[in-house]
Image: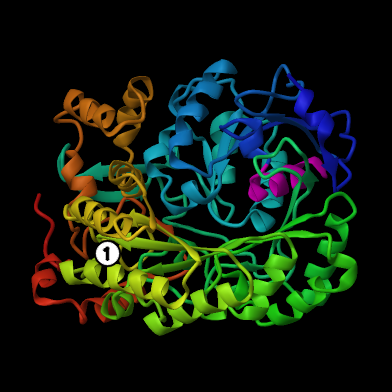
């Protein structure tokens, strides 16, 4: 089962553990090829494996390193919501109860990653400890805190860990509800010795992450990944990747990026520049100039999504020179009014110019990301997206156009967290598909049903843990979730409450005890700025401040 590990080229040196090192299993709840392509998983693994006081073994759903017979800690990095199924399966494989309150002489089970940092509550009953925020800060604090109480009983360990900023111990917080099938009433620590709230931890340095391992077994074969920026300065009202990870940070070109590139090129010729808005790095042009040196002509280069108005002929030429044929931009909509609502500082003219520049620089394909069902959207906004795509095709003939389109999903810690999913979204996806495909454009809609499931998990509370246990055995279709809701009727709200309801502004949210970068008052101000632009038919959807019914 260890065959893939023999193909790894490490960019760090694991430390030989001490004789009394803590035996720790670090798991990714998916196949090796997926997990080893996660930059977050790579970096956390390398951080743990570089400590003498830990003996670290890796675990995936298909392969594993030799595991300790009596692990003291089991960690999971969770990047995709539906991977919770594999978390539960791996716990069972290791003979560990899947619910934290059933554990006694078992490892401390911790989790981290973007899914759990955003809203851990649907999964909270499965974890003893959840790390909220950036691993650069949390990992060493977590290990040090555990070492201090290593030989004490479980209750003492958990209470001690809960004192560390950013470490959330769900069992030490009691959640009450107005009724079994309505909203959260309160979330309180079980006694005065437990912090009232937990604040996400934010790393503010200018040396960001880079791959710690390169392998041909990765989903992106032999790629060396470099984090160029973290967060995004645009702050689109729906965007978790911006709001949850603030402030916007950039890696130093001279001190961080160039040395990282040099390390990566010792083992591979494929580079991936990562970040929510890579091209908004203030020295992005200088980075392109560095990569355009003749000695780097052999490099294969790929970028994650870039800001539309930074797509220049120079950027396109650089990508073509380094074996890329396409570029991806997020436009959300063809409606200027709707982009104003979501704070997308972008015009149709800039989008069209990006397409023209992409073609002029030699790229053959342009991928655009759009969204339907955004709060404030009218039917005419969808028509304007079709008009925009037609105009791009007219002004950049020969450029292959692809529009990927998802349904708006409300995310915790964003100004649009109070909105539910618009039921018209499914029809609007169908409308776009009919009109764009008839024009010969490649339209790739994300499943509306998947957006419903995403919303359920992104807005869920602890009562969903029982539902997740049921659906795990039924499958990951929307029908499976509906079946589970039917079986649990009377013990939790219905699907409508979690997915389609617009919540009140003074409602206790499932994550109200978990603090992100911005306070609730600021999110409400940003929401107010957006809703001032709503049309008449959308006004009825506005969240209000009103007493929550008991």
Q: In which quadrant of the rendered image does the N terminus lie?
A: top right
Q: Position of residue 377 (x, y in %)?
A: 21, 68
Classify 412 as above or below 533.
above
**Residue 145 falls inside the magenta stretch:** no
- Give percent across and percent down for residue 510: 32, 50
Which residues lie in the magenta part? 37-51
Quarter assignment of residue 31: top right
Residue 72 to residue 285: above or below:
above
In the image, 425 versus 544, the foreground residue is 425
Q: Main secondary structure of the magenta part?
A: helix
Work out whether residue 512 can be spotted: no
List x then y, in percent, for residue 290: 81, 75
At 61% across and 70% down in the image, what residue appears? Answer: 278
Give how far across and how far down residue 213 sits, in percent.
79, 45
Q: Which residue is mark 1?
A: 374
Q: Residue at x 72, y 40 (%)?
A: 147
Tell whether 493 sits left or right of 143.
left
The residue nearer to you, when weighing 146 against 416, is 416
Residue 202: which quarter of the image?
bottom right
Q: Is residue 141 visible?
A: yes
In the displayed structure, 261 sits above or below 42; it is: below
State left or right for residue 61 relative to residue 287.
Answer: left
Location of residue 40 with respect to 129 vertically, above or below: below
Q: Is residue 48 left or right of residue 430?
A: right
The foreground one among 415 and 360 is 360
């Amino acid at each position: 089962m260890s065959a893939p590990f023999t193909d790894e080229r490490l960019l760090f040196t694991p430390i030989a553990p001490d004789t009394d090192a803590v035996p720790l299993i670090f798991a990714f709840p998916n196949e090796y090829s997926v997990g080893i392509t996660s930059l977050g998983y790579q970096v956390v693994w390398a951080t743990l494996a570089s400590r003498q006081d830990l003996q670290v073994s890796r675990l995936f759903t298909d392969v594993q390193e030799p595991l300790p017979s009596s692990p003291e800690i089991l960690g999971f990095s969770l990047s995709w919501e539906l991977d919770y199924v594999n978390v539960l399966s791996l716990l069972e494989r290791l003979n560990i109860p899947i619910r934290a309150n059933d554990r006694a002489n078992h490892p401390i089970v911790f989790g981290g990653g973007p899914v759990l940092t955003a809203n851990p509550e649907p999964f909270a009953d499965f974890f003893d400890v959840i790390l909220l925020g950036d691993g650069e800060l949390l990992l060493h604090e977590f290990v040090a805190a555990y070492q201090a109480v290593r030989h004490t009983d479980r209750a003492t360990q958990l209470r001690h860990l809960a004192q560390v900023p950013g470490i959330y111990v769900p069992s030490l917080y009691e959640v009450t509800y107005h009724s079994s099938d309505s909203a959260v009433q309160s979330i309180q620590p079980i006694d005065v010795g437990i912090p009232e709230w937990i604040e996400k931890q934010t790393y503010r340095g200018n040396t960001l992450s880079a791959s710690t391992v390169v392998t041909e077994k990765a989903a992106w074969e032999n790629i060396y990944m470099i984090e160029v920026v973290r967060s995004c300065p645009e702050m689109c009202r729906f965007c978790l990747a911006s709001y949850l990870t603030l402030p916007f940070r950039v890696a130093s070109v001279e001190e961080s990026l160039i040395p990282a590139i040099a390390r990566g090129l010792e083992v591979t010729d494929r580079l991936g520049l990562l970040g929510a808005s890579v091209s908004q790095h203030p020295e992005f042009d200088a980075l392109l100039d560095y990569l355009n040196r003749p000695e780097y002509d052999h490099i294969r280069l790929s970028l994650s999504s870039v800001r539309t108005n930074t797509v220049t002929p120079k950027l396109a030429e650089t990508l073509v020179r380094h074996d890329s044929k396409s570029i991806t931009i997020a436009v959300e909509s063809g409606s200027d009014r709707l982009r104003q609502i979501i704070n997308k500082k972008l015009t149709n003219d800039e989008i069209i110019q990006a397409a023209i520049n992409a073609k002029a620089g030699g790229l053959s394909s342009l991928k655009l990301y759009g969204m339907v069902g955004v709060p404030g959207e009218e039917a005419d906004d969808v028509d304007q997206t079709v008009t925009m795509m037609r105009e791009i095709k007219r002004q950049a003939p020969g450029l292959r156009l692809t529009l990927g389109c998802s349904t708006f999903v409300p995310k915790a810690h964003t100004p649009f967290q109070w909105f539910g999913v618009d039921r018209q979204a499914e029809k609007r996806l169908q409308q776009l598909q009919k009109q764009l495909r008839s024009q010969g454009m490649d339209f790739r809609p994300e499943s509306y049903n998947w957006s419903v499931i995403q919303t359920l998990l992104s807005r869920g509370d602890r009562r969903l843990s029982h539902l997740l246990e049921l659906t795990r055995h039924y499958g990951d279709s929307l029908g499976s979730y509906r079946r589970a809701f039917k079986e649990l009727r009377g013990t939790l709200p219905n699907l409508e409450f979690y997915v389609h309801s617009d919540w009140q502004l003074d409602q206790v949210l499932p994550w109200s005890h978990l603090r992100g970068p911005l306070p609730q008052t600021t999110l409400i101000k940003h929401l107010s700025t957006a809703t001032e632009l709503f049309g008449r038919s959308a006004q009825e959807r506005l969240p209000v401040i009103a007493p929550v019914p008991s």
